[in-house]
Amino acid sequence: MKTVLSVASEVSPLVKTGGLADVTGALPGAMRAEGWRLVTLLPGYPSVMKALKSSRVVRTERACFGGRARVLAGRAAGLELLVLDAPHLFDRAGAIYLGPDGKDWPDNAERFAALSWVAARLAAAGVEDVKPRVLHAHDWQGALAPVYLKAMKGGAGIGTLLTIHNIAFHGLAPASKLAALKLPEAGFTPDGFEYWGKISALKGGLVASDCISTVSPTYARELMTPEFGMGLDGVLRQRVGDLTGILNGIDEELWNPAADPEIAPYKSPAGKAKNRRALLHEFGLADGPGPLCVVISRLTEQKGLDLLLNALDVLAARSGRLALLGSGDAGLEAAWRDAAARLPGVAVRIGYDEALAHRMIGGADAILLPSRFEPCGLTQLYGLRYGTVPVVADTGGLADTVIDANAAALAMGVATGVKFSPVALDPLRFALSRLCNLHGDRKTFTTLQRNAMKQPVGWAASAPQYAALYDRIGGRA
Ligand code: ADP
Ligand code: GLC
């Protein structure tokens, strides 16, 4: 079978901070049906080492960015894995990117350069029966792999694809780390991985990869504009012919309202009522005639939840409720706790809780994503599948996956949610008020929910698009 070496810093269900993990965890299964075998290289964090059963050592690196490392081959959670066991880099308690002080680990550049360098070495040399035609790197943590591979003997015949899940993170390092990161000095130019005097892992990958993809068609277009490109729009414009947007899918077995063990399963919107009552109870909220809304999110500037804090009165005025589950920025956590303390219709759980996320999607009437930018977004897709109407900013993957309930779309019977733009307070307030109006009209709202539940949100459409890319860059035998 044609093989891809996929390299990523997180892979669900083994280690996850966001949607990146969901996608790298789901892609191998989705691509199997397309005739591609994906073997995933990821760091040997403690959770990964624990999950890896009956592994074997397939490679040793004596000098791997400050210590000895081994590559272990094995399986976990149905995935074929290569694990970079480098205790000096990855055997740490706590979060995968952040130290106990809440700041990035000071050696993150080395940690993920090591991952990328080992990926390139494995791809070039092959390991056991893994002789990849394609190296597929994800985000800045994998982005140097194509850079190393290009400079390596045996690297020339392997196609390289870099997928951008979020361009906000560049993986910058000072120029003084060139040698420590095993990077060729000749590449430290504006046409290479140099970025305003620093090393940029992401830019290096964008320049060196045969193809670039991102996780929605709209974000692919947005990335080429100064507003969304975060300083790399020029680089992307130069590569317009090699840039594709392919929508993420979700795991339709894991996220299935008809067989979700966390909820009272249902096949039509009427079945949500029981789950709605349970959710109100779980969050200590009183019922009311308005919509029960949820947010499940990292709390960061990206997600626009600071704006939502200033729009809560719109919901309150219409007896709407809001339950939020999230964690991240300390200021936002505090502001949301404060809102919950002040407003009887608002309840907040600060933390990370997948089971609760299922109960929230199952029980809510609507899910809110007022993101300033959103490469794809997964929770609106969960919302669609569960008849939980998405209210979204008209950007990135949100723009591509939700059909606004305007008069024309309602008349044609295709509307699935509410969209607003620009991402600012007044348009958000208006969107919430539209949600309340739609919710107040039972028949219309049920139609919206039914339409939402019929939307395709799995990998059926996207897997062939990845296959076409793999074939394009790695078609040789
Ligand atoms: P991003 O990757 O930018 O965080 P996505 O919407 O692509 O956004 O993916 C986020 C993923 O993380 C989803 O699977 C979502 O359910 C999950 N998630 C985010 N925050 C939480 C939380 N506090 N508890 C449980 N799951 C969460
Ligand atoms: C990123 C983006 C999100 C996307 C996810 C998976 O974290 O913020 O929009 O869905 O990656 O591609």
Image (tube, helix red, strand yellow):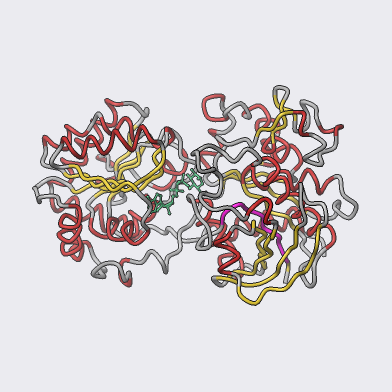
- Specify the principal SS of the magenta part: strand
Q: Is residue 191 left or right of residue 84?
A: right
Residue 83 located left or right of residue 148: left
- Horizontal and vertical percent for residue 444? 18, 50
Question: Magenta span has 4?
Answer: yes
Which of the 4 image quadrants contains residue 79? bottom right
In the image, 406 versus 253, the foreground residue is: 253
Q: What range of the chain is rendered magenta? A: 3-10
Relative height, residue 33 to residue 432 (above, below) = below
What residue sits 66% from the left and 69% below the top?
A: 35
Q: Is 275 above or below relative to 165?
A: below
* Count of marks, rendered view: 0
Farthest residue, direction bottom: 54
What residue is rendered at 82% in x and 36% in y?
A: 179
In the rendered image, residue 15, in percent from the top left (x then y), is placed at: 53, 58
Where does the N terminus fall, quadrant-wise? bottom right
Left or right of 269, for residue 49: right
The answer to whether residue 74 is above or below residue 103 is below
Is 101 in front, or is 144?
A: 101
Quarter of the image where one finds residue 265: bottom left
Furthest residue toward top: 196
Q: Does the stretch in magenta take in 259?
A: no
- Across and down, in percent, residue 169 comes to 58, 36
Q: Nearer the viewer, residue 322 or 220?
A: 322
Q: Quadrant of the C terminus?
A: bottom right
Q: Image point 56% across, 24% down: which residue?
A: 226
The percent coordinates of residue 373 (x first, y second) are 45, 35
16 or 316: which is nearer to us? 16
Q: Residue at x 81, y 49 (%)?
A: 149
